[in-house]
Image (cartoon, helix red, strand yellow):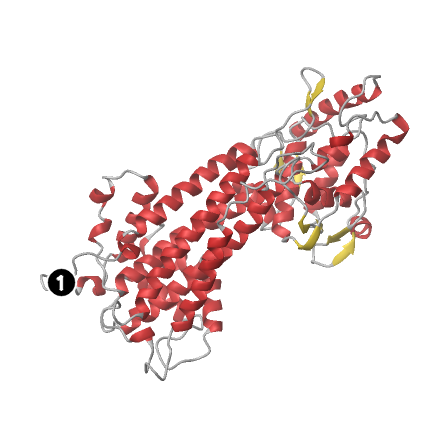
Amino acid sequence: MESVVVGTGPVTFEELLAVARDGAPVVLGEDARAAVVRAREVVEELAAGERPTYGVSTGFGALATRHIPTELRAQLQRSLVRSHAAGSGPEVEREVVRALMLLRLSTLATGHTGVRPETAELLAGLLAHGITPVVREYGSLGCSGDLAPLAHCALALMGEGEVRDAEGTLRPAADALAAAGLVPVELAAKEGLALINGTDGMLGMLVLAIEDLRMLLRTADVAAAMSVEAQLGTDRVFAPELQALRPHPGQAASAANLVALLDGSGVVASHRGPDCNRVQDAYSLRCSPQVHGAARDTVEHAATVAGRELAAAVDNPVVLPAEGRLESNGNFHGAPVAYVLDFLAIVAADVASISERRTDRFLDKARNHGLPPFLADDPGVDSGHMIAQYTQAAVVSEMKRLAVPASVDSIPSSAMQEDHVSMGWSAARKLRRAVDGLTRVVAIEVLTAARALDLRAPLEPSPATGAVVALLRSSGVAGPGPDRYLSPEIEAAVGLVASGAVLSAAESVIGALR
């Protein structure tokens, strides 16, 4: 696999995804090495001076008033990392840790942190060899950066703590580094602080979530089209001239997708004539583009914020090589990232909510326009998809709780020095659960709508939605019939949504959705 070169400029979304999810190796660019050397010269000059400099020759946080003599500065850096590697709880996912490491390396590469080249090179070496430090779920307040998660990674650079090797085996860091031919570093002045003072964890999870949500929102359009079609809804409300009256770009894109997905549908055509007595569809059908579109626009706002943060050099203090000085600052505060992480959890919950409402309409004989109750084979004997909707409802309810913002909370720490924090890491962790929940809710809608489309036979679905039904049927998900063990079919549908296979099936017929 081609290596990702980390230079003085920002890494891209594509590069982050390649490293985090695909395991792409990483190398430090020559421009970055030169910038790191220049910044290190500034730190070493200040370290040799008589005047105390925060992060170089003082304690940290509320202990910053103590001047640390030269002979204790290496111990200062070791103690900082060891004490801050205080996470607890389950291990964080490999893709998140790799994203976090890449983004910290990207900041080191800007030449504003003052680390030595060999320290930056070792961080790149861990990524290149697939060595992933064990990071725990809890420990970051999202201010002074993701301190505990980053400290667990810095600990591995020292040859301490636990890591997962490229095969996923849990090993002492020293053993894994030795097996890869890597030599631990003894941290010098300023380096411990530079390795742990960033928004890298929450930012990495934001980029990963944006990628997932972009795919899931297009898949939600597929699910909505299947529901509109199988519930004998109209596609006329999605016409471009109607969308132009309210010019939100996401809404226009979602409506255009629905028009394309429903094109050629025999089911839709069957009730287009003068005999149709439907005045207008329920909101969950008719307003799908408005909800899905607003979600799209929110995701793109989050992507704008993520792009700015990818271009940032977040550390405290920062090196200003041109001026030959270090300056304290507050750029480590995670508020910009935390806010959009919370926005996206709200978006995920609302898209899941409208998806569940579309699904529920299939199961009620008073609202499903001639389909059997609960889409059951023999209602009363069979329950059909009754409890599949319960599962959806349980997930949606959980997602509503996850939509409560973390960023409005703050809990003081460090003897009131850090008296307002962003909770951005917590916002990111709950967003990951929300993205998983949305995947499951959309999958159940697709599963239920496919069953309903089969029950509309001999009417034919559109080529695009028909391709999705065919995908399910070829993937171990049978069509209508007597009740059977449903959980494996739900999990199969979840896998097809999560992998992008449902979206790809529709796009294979009509081309890329917007």
Foreground pick, 64 / 384? 64
The number of discs equals 1
Residue 66 falls left or right of residue 132: right
What residue did someone put label 1 on? 277
Snapshot quadrant of residue 486: bottom left
Residue 480 placement: quadrant: bottom left
x, y (%) of residue 237? 22, 51
Closer to us: 11 or 316: 316
Q: Is residue 356 left or right of residue 95?
A: left
Q: Quick check: can you spot residue 436?
A: yes
* Residue at the limit of the structure toward the bottom, as seen here: 381
Give above or below for 380 relative to 490.
below
Amino acid type assigned to the residue bearing label 1 in the image: Asn
Farthest residue in the top direction? Answer: 323
Residue positioned 30% across, 56% down in the render: 284
- In this view, the residue farthest toward the right is 71
Badge 1 element: loop
Q: Residue at x 11, y 61 (%)?
A: 273
Q: Residues within 10 Å of mark 1 (few under 14, many from 20)?
A: few
Q: Is residue 4 visible?
A: no
